[in-house]
Amino acid sequence: MKQKILFVVCLLFGLMFINAGLNKFLNYMPMPEDLPDKMVKATAAFTEIGWIMPLVGAAEVIGGLLFMIPKFRALGAIIVFPIVIGILLTNLVAAPSGLPIALVLLAINLWVIFENREKYLTMIS
């Protein structure tokens, strides 16, 4: 039962990151109207730089795809982890209303990392 729940949670998590990553390339989801000024300025700065958004979008798509495949889930969790930390910090600093979702994303990511901890031991031994 635990494996089925983990699979469904990872499938939804992965699809969410794939959607967010594809949006960075295709811009099909409009920006919310009630974004704080800090968020608007940060997004404008990232867009101005030019290479950051495609890099994060590619990491989200690749990490989301890997997260959904049980064999590669440990790798997907590591790829997506810095993005989840960025989401958490952004919500802590600029948009506290999104903090509950950020904490859920962090919990899911940490759960998958914990479940795959034996796969990471070879990297640090």
Image: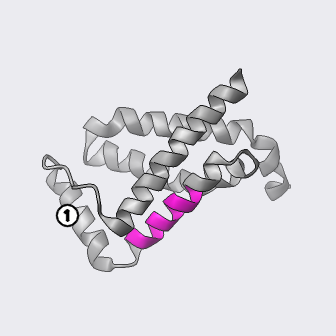
Where residue 23 appears, as percent x and y from the top left, is 36, 60
Q: Which residue is mark 1?
A: 41
The secondary structure that dominates the magenta segment is helix
| Quadrant assignment for the N terminus | top right
- Write the residue at 37% across / 32% down: 100
| Relative height, residue 19 to residue 91 (above, below) | below
Residue nearest the observer in this picture, 122 or 50: 50
Residue 75 relative to residue 86: left or right: right
Residue sitting at 25 percent across and 48 percent down? 94
Q: Position of residue 110 (x, y in %)?
A: 60, 39
| Residue 31 image-quadrant placement | bottom left
Outermost residue toward the top? 1
* Residue 46 in the image: above or below residue 125: below
| Quarter-of-image position of residue 37 | bottom left
Which residue corresponds to the image point at 26% horizontal and 77% vertical from the top-left?
Answer: 48
Amino acid type at circle 1 is: Lys
Q: Nearer the viewer, residue 5 or 96?
A: 5
Position of residue 63 in the picture relative to residue 39 (left or right): right
Q: Residue 22: x, y in percent?
A: 42, 61
> Could you say whether the residue bearing mark 1 is in a helix, strand or loop?
helix
Left or right: where does residue 84 sit relative to residue 33? right
Q: Which residues are magenta?
A: 53-63
Can residue 61 be found in the magenta stretch?
yes
| Screen quadrant of the C terminus | bottom right
The structure residue drawn at horizontal position 22% and vertical position 68%, both measured from the top left corner, is 44
Count of numbered marks: 1
Residue 113's place in the image compared with 56, above or below, is above
* Magenta residue check for 101: no
Query: Alpha-carbon neighbours of circle 1 within 10 Å: few (<14), some, or many (≥20)?
Result: few
- Colouring rule applied to residues: one colour
From the top left corner, tell me how far across and down residue 80 is, in percent.
55, 54
